Image (tube, rainbow, N blue to C red):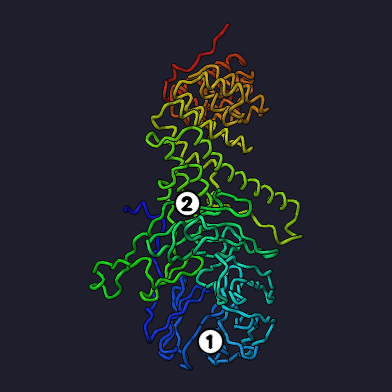
Amino acid sequence: MGEEDYYLELCERPVHFEKANPVNCVFFDEANKQVFAVRSGGATGVVVKGPDDRNPISFRMEDKGEVKCIKFSLENKILAVQRTSKTVDFSNFTPDSPQLEYTQECKTKNANILGFCWTSSTEIVFITDQGIEFYQVLPEKRNLKLLKSQNINVNWYMYCPESAVILLSTTVLGNVLQPFYFRAGTMSKLPKFEIELPAAPKSTKLSLSERDIAMATIYGQLYVLFLRHHSRTSNSTGAEVVLYHLPREGACKKMHILKLNRTGKFALNVVDNLVVVHHQDTETSVIFDIRLRGEFDGTVTLHHPVLPARSIQPYQIPVAGPAPVTSQSPIPCKLYSSSWIVFQPDIIISASQGYLWNLQVKLQPIVNLLPDKGRLMDFLLQRRECKTVVLSVCSQMLTESDRAALPVIATVFDKLNQEYKKYLDAEQSYTLALEAGQSRSGPFLRRPARTQAVVDQSDMYTHVLSAFAEKEMPQKFVIAVLMEYIRSLNQFQITVQHYLHELVIKTLVQHNLFYMLHQFLQYHVLSDSKPLACLLLSLESFYPPAHQLSLDMLKRLSTANDEIVEVLLSKHQVLAALRFIRGIGGQDNISARKFLDAAKQTEDHMLFYTIFRFFEQRNQRLRGNPSFTPGEHCEEHVAFFKQVFGDQALMRPTTF
């Protein structure tokens, strides 16, 4: 399988830590995404590494027994270590403060601590088998203050640091889940909900394992993912992932079912808002996108994998050691190993090999695996780093070999412009709100983020359409594609930029399709604009009616004539500017110097001669003498004319 077939990969720079062994215990903290390697209970050293840490944290601590759990508070200010089922030990990690430990015992009698979670730099939650205890840590006083507690029988717990929600498994079967939400010193109890088990269990023992539950934020919403190994309906085989939406307010609701169509051992990750399901038996993974259209059965939406199952791209472990040794070839990494542990959202840890990877999605290979261009665009536009791939798809569908049908091209353009319009509307609302002075009354005014899904006209022009228009393609197809893009922009009420109209006109002129150009202008298919009018003026020598079409357009725009002349001169269209002035009868009042300057800049001597002769004739007509007056400041141009054409070329005064 070539590299272009794998759409999942492990990150290039993993976190490398000392592998787990009888002396070295490895712990992972989901909130800070840190790996702790604790040697001999900390006596011979603790090394803490995270994905963004350039410098690992190393320290020693007294061996006071086996470490059950170890985590830093957010910002790494306070270290918490659990060694017994009743207490958690703390030590401050601020500079110049003595490393004195202080201890907190859980409040509930006869309760055992299952674990703890930091919810901020000074707030911590103990989860016991009999409830939940929320504390504020006071590092200066070296003690803790209980903020709130709740008694409830707990089988196991799960924490989602991104949304600060802890999920407790309660009841005998374990399938009633109780969420709590933490924010700035407050603990809120959210409505509890029940996970539907595959079939009514015969026994009364714990039936829902934490192995089959994950919590993750997908498209900004928190979901609880339940891996159901057997479908509730007898006619369908294979496991499925059920997504329960957990809102801040209101009840939790079953929303999506991801059909896996296979059985065995699975693991879940969430990458770039995609649910990735790894299957150990076949050593492959599939991805699901809940934003893509699925089958709605009235209550939930059923989804199938977006793409065929593929393995994660093979990964080579670099050989560490002195330079001569590292010339050895890297060792292939055993993918889908039974020693792999996955954490949300996108982390895979191999404790036996000593690596932590982030899982990543590769978009380019997906282009060839999803033949339906409309669905492909729906998929790509939801991805974080999509712009280059989206533009490459647009270019690819306009090539001779992979040419798409016009309705498909239209669909793709509409999907792009829908996103573009959404962004323009949000930007406009933001500007209006800013002008109305809402920023003072509320802090909620945020400039809309320009995501990579916003592909604007300049992107399309620069990367796709300008190159496409120059290719050897059937001219009708080229024009049809350009007009289709303009049609799509108009449909979404997006003002078409003049350079797109210019591209259409240049393409029509190139292929001598003047009748089509005339029709497009007559029926206002191409919107009026000053740059377009100037372009038409410059086309007069190829197509004489262009002059009148241009003047009509400028009249409709009620543009100041001086401005039009300035624009034409800046584009070195000196003759067009002169014709325009004569067309509106203003040739007697224009500055000779301005036109002679522009003509000289073109370095076209014959053009300079023509313009110079025109003004000599004007002088003769108005003053009876072809010479320029000192007030016109044309001395340098007269000298230049003599230098190039000689004195004898100057016009002599005609006498009657």
Please name whichever residue, 343 or 47, is drawn nearer the observer in this view of the structure: 343
Which residue matches tag 1?
A: 82
Q: For label 2, count other residues whose C-alpha is less than 10 Å away and answer few (under 14), some (14-19) or many (20+).
A: some
Query: Residue 330: where, in percent of width, then height?
Result: 28, 67
Circle 1 sits in a helix, a strand or a loop, which is it? Answer: strand
Please name whichever residue, 535 or 364, is drawn nearer the observer in this view of the structure: 364
Farthest residue to the front: give it: 202
- 267 is higher (above) or lower (below) than 352: above
* Inter-mark Cα distance, 1 to 2: 43 Å
Q: Nearer the N terminus, badge 1 or badge 2?
A: 1
Q: Locate residue 311: give its quadrant.
A: bottom left
Question: Looking at the image, is mark 1 or mark 2 nearer the viewer?
Answer: 2
Residue 633 visible in this rendered orientation of the protein: no
- 630 is higher (above) or lower (below) than 292: above
Which residue matches tag 2?
A: 306
Asked whether, in this view, residue 422 is left or right of residue 311, the answer is: right
Q: Amino acid at mark 2?
A: Val
- 522 is higher (above) or lower (below) than 97: above
Query: Residue 286: where, in percent of width, then height?
Result: 44, 57
Residue in view at x 60 percent, y 72 percent: 167
